[in-house]
Amino acid sequence: MSRYYFHIRDGWDVIPDEEGMELPDFGAAHTEAYASAYDLSRAAAREGTNVSSCAIQIMDEAGNVLARVRVPDQKRLA
């Protein structure tokens, strides 16, 4: 198992994931990031906030950025 970190980026601002999550592989981390992105999008739609510039950045234990998953536009989820 490897530890992956899911930092939330909003433009230049970053909300760091200090704990991370142990997952079996990058595929599982990618799935987790997509699920989190859709959760953020749904919450933003309920609250009326804009997340168009938000993304979840997946990092490994060494600090390497493995991928970025954009938070979908909540209008497309309606």
Image: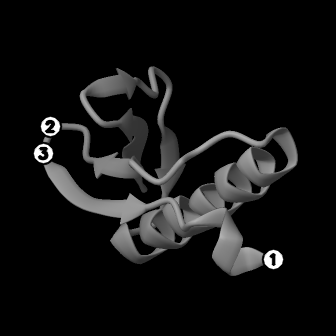
Mark 1 vs mark 3, CA separation in Å: 34 Å
Q: Position of residue 27 (x, y in %)?
A: 41, 77
- First along the sequence among labels 1 and 3: 3
Q: Amino acid at mark 3?
A: Asn
Compared with 49, 26 (above or below) is below
Drawn side of residue 45 relative to residue 53, left or right: right
Compared with 78, 20 (above or below) is above
Q: Amino acid at mark 2?
A: Ala
Report the mark closest to the observer, 1 or 2: 1
Disc 2 residue crowd, few under 14, some 14–19, many 20+, Cα 10 Å = few
- For mark 2, give the secondary structure: loop
Q: Position of residue 72 (x, y in %)?
A: 54, 67
Report the mark closest to the observer, 2 or 3: 3
Q: Determine the residue positioned at 57% across, 62% down.
A: 32
- First along the sequence among labels 1 and 2: 2
The quarter of the picture where the C terminus appears is: bottom right
- For mark 3, give the secondary structure: loop
Mark 1 vs mark 2, CA separation in Å: 38 Å
Disc 3 residue crowd, few under 14, some 14–19, many 20+, Cα 10 Å = few
Q: Position of residue 54 (x, y in %)?
A: 43, 47
Image quadrant in which you'd find residue 64: top left
Report the mark closest to the observer, 1 or 3: 1
- For mark 1, give the secondary structure: loop
Q: Position of residue 42 (x, y in %)?
A: 77, 58
Which one is in front, 60 or 74?
74
Mark 2 vs mark 3, CA separation in Å: 6 Å
Q: Which residue is mark 2?
A: 62
Which one is in front, 1 or 67?
67
Is disc 2 in contact with disc 3, using a CB cutoff of under 8 Å?
Answer: yes
Q: Which residue is mark 3?
A: 64
Image quadrant in which you'd find residue 6: top left
Residue 78 is marked as 1
